[in-house]
Image: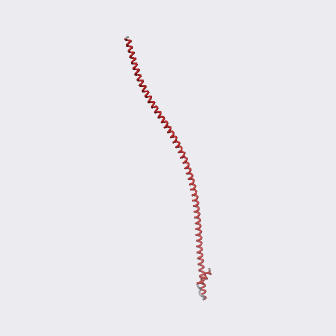
Amino acid sequence: MSAKAGKGKQKEKSEDEQLREADDQLRELAQEAWQLERRLVIEAEKHQRYKCVQLDLKREIALLGESMENEERLAQNTRIDMCRQYKAMQQELCHRICLLQQTIDSLREELEAQRKTLEQTKEEKDEVIAQKNKKINEQKQQMENMAIVFGNMLKETLENMSQRMEGQQGRGAAPVRSSDRSFRVGEAR
């Protein structure tokens, strides 16, 4: 029986050891389960935080998308408005250029007409001056001719008067008075 008793003790020991080992394993497993639960809680919290961050990022992306769309609409509206203003300014500038070109053409035509009028007036003036100079020269010539003719007439008259006076003095007639001379000079004309 002693061999049986030794085996029984060993069995008991081994059962005690097995219980201790099982307890140790159970504690280790409990410790591991607790660590795993703790990790699970931490991971769940992390996951929750990531979900919150992800939601925040999605909201921010959505807001940025809306903001970007608004900016794009604003930029598009600004481009359209600027194009419209540019075209309006370009049309206004073209209109002003056309008006100024018409004014320039009109002023050129008027200037050319004024030049022609000035040339014509100069020609007419030169012609009038030439005619007047011709007339003055003709009148000078006529006056010179008349002076010569008058001089000749006066000379003839004086000679005639001298001859008459000499003839009357030779006959014993009274000398000719100056009033008689002027009367006779008037007759000779």
Q: Position of residue 50 (x, y in %)?
A: 46, 33
Q: Residue furthest top?
A: 1
Horizontal placement of 17 versus 169: left or right? Answer: left
Compared to residue 26, the image places residue 125 above or below, namely: below
Which image quadrant: the C terminus? Answer: bottom right
| Picture quadrant where residue 165 is located | bottom right
Which residue is more in the foreground, 59 or 135?
Answer: 59
Q: Nearer the viewer, residue 152 or 44?
A: 44
Marker count (numbered): 0
Q: Position of residue 170 (x, y in %)?
A: 60, 88
Location of residue 123 with respect to 172 vertically, above or below: above
Of residues 90 and 46, which is closer to you in this image?
46
Percent x, y of residue 81: 54, 46
Q: Which is nearer the eye, 60 or 106?
A: 60
Q: Quadrant of the N terminus?
A: top left
Colour scheme in use: secondary structure
- Left or right of 41? Residue 121 is right
Q: Position of residue 11 (x, y in %)?
A: 39, 15
Does residue 186 sit above or below 53 in this rendering? below
Q: Is residue 66 above or below residue 9?
A: below
